[in-house]
Image: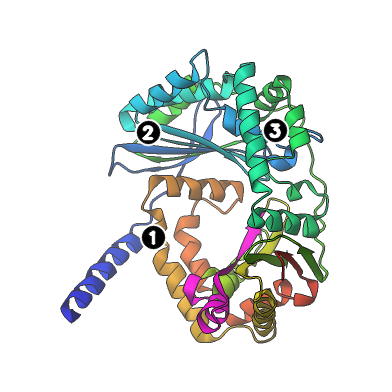
Amino acid sequence: MKKILVLFIVVFSFFMSVAVASIPKVEEVESKGGYKLWMIEDNYLPIVSIKLVFKNSGTAYDTEGKKGLAHMVTGLLDEGAGGISSFDYRKKLESLATTISFDVDEDNFYVNVKTLKDNLEETLKLLNLTLTKPNLKPEIIERIRNQILVIIQKKQESPQYVASKKFKEAVLGSHPYSRTKYGVPKAVRSITREDIVAYVNDNFSKENIIISVVGDVKKSKIRKLLDNHLKLKDERKDVISLPPVKVKNEEQYIKISKSIPQSVVYFGSEGIKRSDKDFYPAYIMNHILGGGGFESRLMDTVREKNGLAYSVYSYLSTYNKAGLFVGYVGTDVKKVDKSIKLIKKELKKLYKDGVTEKELNDAKDYLVNSYPLKMTKNENLAAYLSVMQSENLGIDFLEKRNDYVRSVTAQQIKAAAKDLLDVGKMTFVVVGDN
């Protein structure tokens, strides 16, 4: 058994050293037609992954009275295009071994594409139809609308959804960032075909697109393919300007009664933006507190030592114009008060004393050594390139990221804790009966 363990460690260490030494090179490419993209050429497998981000097109930009519009569009874009029926569209994707998916968050609209090298041209032709001539027949719109209304109804029965939604409303007030991406029934019912057409026409343009490409394709070819087959307009129309974000930094305890066996708790306060110079101290602080799985303080205290919860964690939620520190615990209704008490104790401890050098070094080792494993899939790398571009992190970020992690000091983490972990400024939302 010892020989097997030693062999595993040697093999794992070898692959980790190879991975660390082979950070992929990111190149910036510009086509004659005006497309700018960041890409990584990788011919290990004959696969290409593409991620498109349409900036400032997320749910926060839904017009008043039409909340849920951007999300509805994500459900409509794979229902056929350019005269191709929904069934034939999906059969075409299957024949090309291609996946195209759509998603949206508060800030942006996302398109994820993965296909074989030899099918890239046909895939881009199909993608262009999807983005410029989606199938918006009345019966399809009504089917997607009804599906969304059912989802909203079911979500209202989920304590996690109810607690998360109330938490965002409590700390963000009426700001558009507090919206749920699904919208509300009245607004979803009011969305017309004209609203959907206007969204597509207003949001999918060269002006607000970020393109990331990873895989087995040459720069010269991707330039040509984009110019020939992605026919987006050059500029957008007027874009809604979001109001300033005012996070409610005061102690709040909100209870929502719901007859369930396990209470759900969301807690937190103002956080930090991804582009902030102090992001990495906050990131590592959160890893030690509640983002590091079984190694985190919250998991150790609430679950391992006291057996109060199966799941407890924290994370940094970042938006273009704001950030939140958020925590979660799900626990027996009779144990929720004790769980919250222990969580507050850990928050106060980190706020007052910071972290130990061992905790800091262990966190750094994990975050540095696990980093290459996140770059083993083309789609993961494409997602990295998208964040690098949207957050202006620099084209050499992949090479520098681990240095950012290693450079964080215990003093910086203590300062981050002082900024983010003041229990006297936190909101706790509890869903359940106790």
Out of 149 and 179, give the one closest to the viewer.
149
Residue at which label 1 appears: 372
> Which residue is at a point 52% across and 27% down the rendered structure image?
78
Give the foreground label among 2 and 1: 2
Give the CA distance from mark 2 to mark 1.
23 Å
Colouring used for the render: rainbow
Dot 3, how many residues are within 10 Å of its Cα: few (below 14), some (14-19), or many (20+)?
Answer: many
Give the CA distance from mark 3 to mark 2.
28 Å
Residue at which label 3 appears: 69
Kindly check if marks 3 and 2 are in contact, taking CB atoms under 8 A apart as contact. no
Query: What's drawn in magenta, residue-wise?
Result: 293-318
Image quadrant where residue 423 sits: bottom right
Look at label 2 and name its amino acid: Thr
Local secondary structure at mark 2: strand
Out of 101 and 311, give the one closest to the viewer.
311
The spot of residue 3 in percent (x, y) is 16, 78
The spot of residue 142 in percent (x, y) is 65, 24
The spot of residue 126 in percent (x, y) is 46, 22
115 sits left or right of 193 in the view: left
Local secondary structure at mark 3: helix
Give the CA distance from mark 3 to mark 1.
37 Å
> Which residue is at a point 46% across and 45% down the rendered structure image?
382
Residue 310 magenta-highlighted: yes
- Residue 177 in view here: yes
The spot of residue 266 in percent (x, y) is 68, 64
Residue 226 magenta-highlighted: no
Look at label 1 and name its amino acid: Pro
Check the picture and name the quadrant holding the N terminus: bottom left
Q: Residue 115 carries which label?
A: 2
